[in-house]
Image: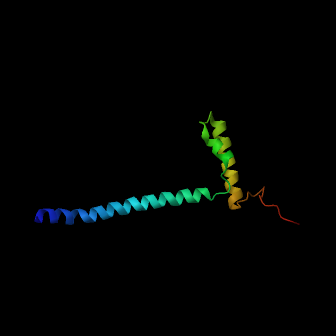
Amino acid sequence: MQIVTVIVDALTPLAVAGLGVFFARASRRIEQVQWARKQSWWDDSMAGLFATPAAGLDDIQAAYDELAERFRADLYVTRQTQPLLATQP
C-alpha cells in the first residue's frame, strides 16, 4: 500500500507538468491560427501561390515578391524610392 502511495506521489508532478506542456502548445497553436485569420493580405489568390509545388526558381521568386508586397502594404512599410502611400501635395 505504501509503495502505491509513493508511486502516485512521484507521478503526480510529472503528470501536472505534462498537462501543462500539452495545454501550452495547444493554446499557442490556437493563437497562431487566430492571428493568421486576421491578416487582411491573405486571401484565396495567396493560397493559390502555395497550393501546387513551384516549377522553378522563377515561380518561387514570384510568390516571394507577391507575399513581400502584401506584407509591406499591410504594415505600411515603404521603399525609399517608391512609397506605398501617396501623399497629397
Whether residue 18 is visible, yes or no, is: yes
Q: Residue drawn 61% across and 36% down?
A: 54
Q: Residue drawn 37% across and 60% down?
A: 21
Give 23 or 75, whichever is nearer the viewer: 23
Residue 45, compared with residue 6, is above or below; it is above
Q: How is the image coloured?
A: rainbow
Specify the farthest residue to the top: 55
Q: Residue drawn 52% across and 61% down?
A: 31
Residue 40, compared with residue 58, is above or below; it is below
> Residue 9, percent across and down?
20, 66
* Image side of residue 13 versus residue 31, left or right: left
Q: Residue drawn 31% across and 64% down?
A: 16
> Residue 58, percent across and down?
66, 37
> Residue 84, percent across and down?
77, 58
> Residue 62, percent across and down?
68, 42
Res 25 → quadrant: bottom left
* Image side of residue 28 versus residue 20, left or right: right
Whether residue 65 is visible, yes or no, is: no
